[in-house]
Image (cartoon, rainbow, N blue to C red):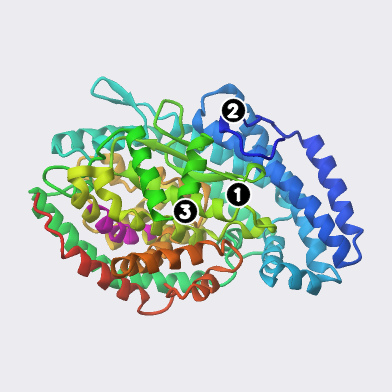
Amino acid sequence: MKTEPIKFSQYPFIVPTEKRTVNKLEKLLQEIKECGSINTAVTAIKHWNKYMDELDTQSSVIYVRYTLDSTNPRNKKAMAALDELGPVVSKYQVEYNKVLCKARYRKDLEAKFGKYLLKQKDISLKVFDEKIIQESIEENKLCTRYSEILGGAQIPFRGETLNLSQIGKYMQDANRDTRREAAVALDKWIGEHDEELGDIYSKLVNLRNEMAKKLGFKNYIELGYYRMGRTDYTAKEVKKYRDQIYASVVPSCQKLYKAQMKNIGVKNPQFYDYSVSFKSGNPVPAGDEQYLVGVANKMYHALGKESGEFFDFMVKNELLDLSARPGKVPGGYCTTFPLYKSPFIFSNFNGTAGDVDVLTHEGGHAFQAYLCANFKVPEYRNAGMEACEIHSMSMEFFAYPYAEGFFGKDAKKYLYHHLSGALEFLPYGVCVDEFQHFVYEHPTITHAERCAKWKELEAKYTPHKLYDECPALNRGTWWLRQSHIFERPFYYIDYTLAQVVAFQFFLENQKNHEKAWKHYLKYTKMGGKYPFTELLARAHLRNPFEDGTVEKAVKGVNKYLKEFEIKE
């Protein structure tokens, strides 16, 4: 495969076979086993990393192609092959990690590559064993099936057939009847798929619980944290953090929601009403995809030389696929192709403010990946999930001075809508997290019991949300469309942790943009060289787990929000 920058459309579509992959990994594993010193080990590690970059690139190409069109038979077949191959590769990765962790030259490895690399590998040995390969394969298949259901959603609406991303646009419409009609259409689709999605999740929970038991854990929670690569905090710290959100953020958000409903003139609001911030409707981008990419290009060039070069690279090499279309999996993400040192941004533009958020949020992820693509240690190229979300969420705030370009006359509306939304997201984010902890503490409960628990937690964290006109959602089924719950257990709390830290960049940017941008670059260029709390300490950022951090951030944000006039 070529290593120089080429366009995404030119990337080879190679489906790695199990036979070839296993043969190659066997040889590389034997090479590292035969090393007796740091000198020979460094060479063997380079060989291993080079092949893993190749394999990761092939896998990323398949995944991207599949999510771009989940109905394509070639893509589905390739994705199914990856589901089978992934656990097999993990088996060899574990064996490789064992050799390094137990090597007599381990201290030399730590001196050369840093202690955190070996600490990561120590954790990896806790999360995988050959005896859970079959469960891992089944887990992958169930997640793929879940994606297919969401990606294949066909929701009738006013003579059209819409996917989940497209119906979302109408649920933000300024006309309340349109919002209600879209919400009812979504509710009908969820009701029709409630049983099937619930069954998939039940199987996933049972599988994960079984894996945890086989690996010697009480339940999946500790295993889930290790699978997320968390080395410096546990569920205990997360529980205290959730309590901070409940105490400091929930009351503040309820005041915002009350003012919002007064502003838009709704006296008995339903859940779909809170998606509209202004009587005249939410801020709408000032142009189509091509226009927005053009504004983003100006923004990234204005921010700095490195960010400008990054965005030119993305556009030139076809590394943005942004429009929603049939067969495309919902949502947005950023992934990488290590062999080409290229990030890739995937999204489903639907004509809402979220389109701009993608260009900044996923752009933040991609910018970090671009800056760290040449790291010799692959494990350091990307930070942990909570740390890397700081890159993306902070980039959203650095885009504020360019809001007029993205939104024209709606610029001020967008700033309020986005900032208030960032604050209001925190209670929902911890709701998702507490739900997952409950589920894996009680793995044998029924789907109906899970839905009842979700409804209970919504009443705790988001008591304003009512689903009186939507019977399926009123049963507590909103979580079924939250893909992280199915595909990445315990991931969602990372967004909230990152948001609290990103607020620090926001507040600093209000005072001194140049200083804040340099601060951001310093943090971003560290990649994943250190665990979350150490990254924060090295970048002189306050730790969200520490008492008072959340409250201080919320006070700063609320002070800024009060400056806006929202009566429109």
Residue in the image at 19% along x and 45% along y: 410
Mark whose residue sits in front, 2 or 3: 3
Q: CA distance from mark 2 to mark 3?
A: 37 Å
- Residue type at mark 1 is Leu
Range of magenta residues = 417-429
Q: Residues within 10 Å of mark 2 (few under 14, many from 20)?
A: many
> Which mark is drawn over residue 75?
2
Would residue 438 be visible to someone looking at this image? no
Q: Quadrant of residue 471?
A: top left
Q: Which label number is shown at residue 207?
A: 1
**Occupied quadrant, residue 554:** bottom left
Is disc 1 surrounded by few (<14), some (14 to 19) or many (20+) residues within 10 Å?
many
Q: How many marks?
A: 3
Indicate whether 387 appears above or below 201.
below
Mark 3 lies on residue: 305
Q: Earlier in the sequence, mark 2 or mark 3?
A: 2
Report the residue that reaches farthest toward the bottom: 547
Question: What distance separates the C-alpha of mark 3 from that of mark 1?
Answer: 48 Å
Name which residue type carries label 3: Lys
Q: Residue at x 44, y 29 (%)?
A: 152
Q: Closest to the observer: 481 or 46? A: 46
Can you give x and y, in whole percent of width and height, for residue 222 in the image?
58, 65
